[in-house]
Image (cartoon, rainbow, N blue to C red):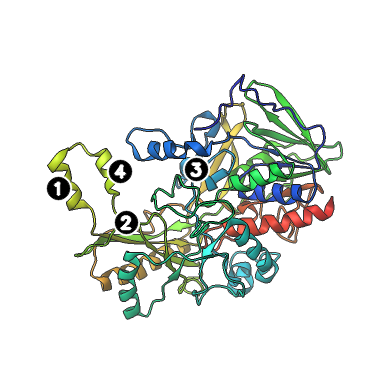
Amino acid sequence: MAEDGGVGDGVDRAPASRADVCVVGSGPAGALVAHRLAEQGADVVVLEAGPRFDFADRREQQERHIRPGMDDPWEMGGPRDDYTTAGRHYPLNAARVKGVGGSTLHWQGMVMRLHERDFEMETRHGVGVDWPIDYEDLRPYYADAERALGVAGAMDNPYAPPREEPYPLSAFPPSYSDSLFAEACERLGIDMHSVPNARNSEPYDGRAPCQGYGTCRPVCPSGAKYTAESHVEKAESAGARVIDHAPVQRLEHDDAGDVVEAAVYATPDGTGHRQTARRFVLACGGVENARLLLLSASEQHPDGLANSSDAVGRFFMDHLFAGAGGRLDERTRQNHVGFITSECHQFYDDEDPIEGTKLEFLNYAGPSPVIEALHAETWGDELLAQLRESYGTHIAMGGLVEQLPEAENRITLDPERRDDHGNPVPHVEWSLSERTKRAVRRANDVQHAILEELGVDIEWTVGPEATGPAYHQMGTTRMGTDPDESVVDAECRTHDLSNLWVVGSSVFPTGGAMNPTLTIAALSLRAAASLSASL
């Protein structure tokens, strides 16, 4: 449960009298930046819109997740988190968390590097845009990020980008269902390899190893899975101040419109505050970064802050899910592992289709017997027979498919609906191109081939018409060298305001098909180095 953030909780939420850096948001991007700068002696203030969640309550949150009729364990929803959509429906709140730690509080924990081609899509394939940096620029920061998060992995992926250093922790072994897939994949000439995970395979950084609860998403009761709470705590130990329940309403700049002077935030007692600082860092995620810049429109910046390019909010991207599954005439031990241990990057760099595709061998196919029993309307022998019938023979594959940036996919401000502070809520305009649908269809073809080779009776497919997002919001404050076409430069500093940085997946020019958190972390550490040099 969140610690009480209401009137009378005794927490001082007044602004700091002096701050070198004000960070807005305490997810992985904001937490890593805050820790790195505080560690180097900077006075850092972090403003977080949501609450602090007490780790001692994780077991209770797990119970809220598995029991029928219980609320979201991370307390999302209501006017605070309202939004609207157009085009293809985008369920924004399905995977957001506002609170200290951000969306790492309930993420799955998969952390892989982007491939070299992801930084050069226009040069290599004539689509999308190139990043202003390449893989080699980010390579040392990827290694730094893997150490910071505590990544368990193995150097067994022949399709991964080059690396010399081993992962900090040994990889989790393949699951039982992985071994079933392995024989079929070998016959088809398809390679399987381990998945790098930001969860402890052994004790690391003061956190316990994985206990096998199986509820990794949305709650890890053991603390083995990394959350940004750990770097928030480290930042505070280094002297940073973190203010929760402090949603930032807008940024205010000087008379010339060249530098940000203050972040205006609200507190639960209805008081408004201005936090001044020498430098500001937005780390609110792919939607809220853009929304806050748009909410900060002024006479000097009528279309929103840092938006002379008209790129703020545009080029919204996500990864699309492709999957298929069914039943096998033998035991599969479904749901024994709550995360993915094997995947396949073999089709990632193919030119047909150009969009990258990452295939996953799911360890949580079919219903969980615990959750199914709790939700069942039967009892005793009848329930036991039902569980025996439904459990133990399911098997499935998943995958992520790249979505290329399109200007029409964007985040804007809704002209009519308001949040609990009277601000326009985010409006998500999102659709899929025929090219993206073709990539999803091709992923399904490979999945079906593997499942059929295994002898699976395929019962369901998530294909082009049924696909949905992976909730990896990217691209809305893209980086680039040209101020007329991008929002931030290669160091994540905005082109328009000299003391404002934006970090997180919103700066991705293209998204690849890899889970984005490791790249978020690497870019944030790189931005922190640049920001530190500017102080």
Q: Which residue is mark 2?
A: 365
Three-letter code for the amino acid on which mark 4 is drawn: Ile
Q: Residues within 10 Å of mark 3 (few under 14, many from 20)?
A: some
Q: Residue at x 65, y 59 (%)?
A: 522
Of residue 475 and residue 74, the one placed in the foreground of this image is: 74
Of residue 145 and residue 455, the one placed in the foreground of this image is: 145
Q: CA distance from mark 3 to mark 1?
A: 38 Å
Mark 1 element type: helix
Q: CA distance from mark 2 to mark 3?
A: 24 Å
Q: Earlier in the sequence, mark 3 or mark 1?
A: 3
Residue 11, x across and y down, in percent: 66, 26
Above/below status of 522 relative to 494:
below
Point out which mark residue 385 bears. 1
Q: CA distance from mark 3 to mark 4?
A: 25 Å
Q: Residue at x 81, y 42 (%)?
A: 20
Q: Earlier in the sequence, mark 2 or mark 3?
A: 3
**Which mark lies nearer to you, 3 or 1?**
1
Q: Earlier in the sequence, mark 2 or mark 1?
A: 2
Q: Residues within 10 Å of mark 1 (few under 14, many from 20)?
A: few
Mark 2 element type: loop
Q: Earlier in the sequence, mark 1 or mark 4?
A: 4
Point out which mark residue 371 bears. 4
Q: Residues within 10 Å of mark 4 (few under 14, many from 20)?
A: few
Three-letter code for the amino acid on which mark 3 is drawn: Leu
Above/below status of 105 relative to 149:
above
Q: CA distance from mark 2 to mark 1?
A: 19 Å
Q: Earlier in the sequence, mark 2 or mark 4?
A: 2
Point out which mark residue 92 bears. 3
